[in-house]
Image (tube, rainbow, N blue to C red):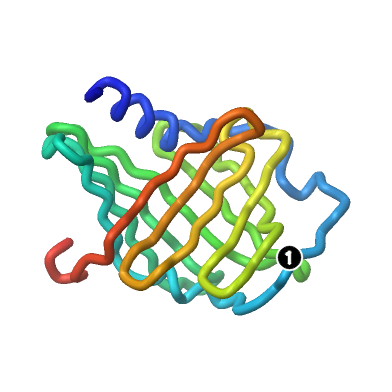
Amino acid sequence: MKNITILVLITLMGCTSNTKEATDHPEETVKNQGNTDFKWLLGVWERSMKGDESMNHFEAWSVDSFGLKGTGTTIIDETVTEELIWIFSRNDSFFYKAHPQQNETATLFHITEIKDSFFRSENEGHDFPKYIEYYRQGDSLYANIGDESQRIAFKFRRQDERSFR
């Protein structure tokens, strides 16, 4: 079970780069465009691995000059890896950009659906994942990644930012 959990985390962090960006899609419209400020993501979120105290994942989201900036930090035993994440708008479209530390370049996903406390981003040209979704319910944040054959779900709990520092 521990090996499967580690594999899932590595898969999430292994959003490898692909030269075909999400902007290659002709359909630049966003379905159900609701609240587009994404402020419901702000704060520090923790995902603990049940039964494995040696592994934790945190996401910390804040506002920057271009939109939102996130840092995903994974701690396995004493090894720390990070992924930089951005949500921003360009030419009346919204994008999710992920740059895991082990990749040379970032991968861009076009945000195709926005509702209150939910968004879905897609990049059909990317190997895995082809989509990334986030949604919030109360003090829980959920993320799903996947493609046409598999879906991996993640659940985070809001943390006190002072305890994270």
**Which corner quadrant holds the N terminus?**
top left
Which residue is found at the position 53% from the left and 37% from the top?
151
Which residue is found at the position 68% from the left and 62% from the top?
113
Taking 26 as reference, is 112 left or right?
left
Taking 141 as reference, is 20 left or right?
right
Residue 46: quarter of image: bottom left
Taking 58 as reference, is 78 left or right?
left
- Looking at the picture, does residue 156 appear above or below residue 1? below
Q: Amino acid at mark 1?
A: Ser
- Looking at the picture, does residue 14 appear above or below residue 132? above
- Looking at the picture, does residue 60 appear above or below residue 117? above
**Which corner quadrant holds the C terminus?**
bottom left
Which residue is found at the position 43% from the left and 36% from the top?
12
Q: Which residue ends up furthest to the right in the rendered image?
A: 26
Taking 3 as reference, is 96 left or right?
right
Which residue is found at the position 59% from the left and 42% from the top?
107
- Looking at the picture, does residue 67 appear above or below residue 122? below
Residue 119 lies, in percent from the top left, at 59, 62
Relative depth, front residue between 140 and 22:
140
Relative depth, front residue between 97 and 148:
148
Kindly state the secondary structure of the residue where label 1 is placed: strand
Residue 14 lies, in percent from the top left, at 46, 31
Query: Crowdedness of circle 1 by 10 Å Cα count: few (<14), some, many (20+)?
Result: some
Residue placed under numbered mark 1 in the picture: 93
Residue 154 lies, in percent from the top left, at 39, 46
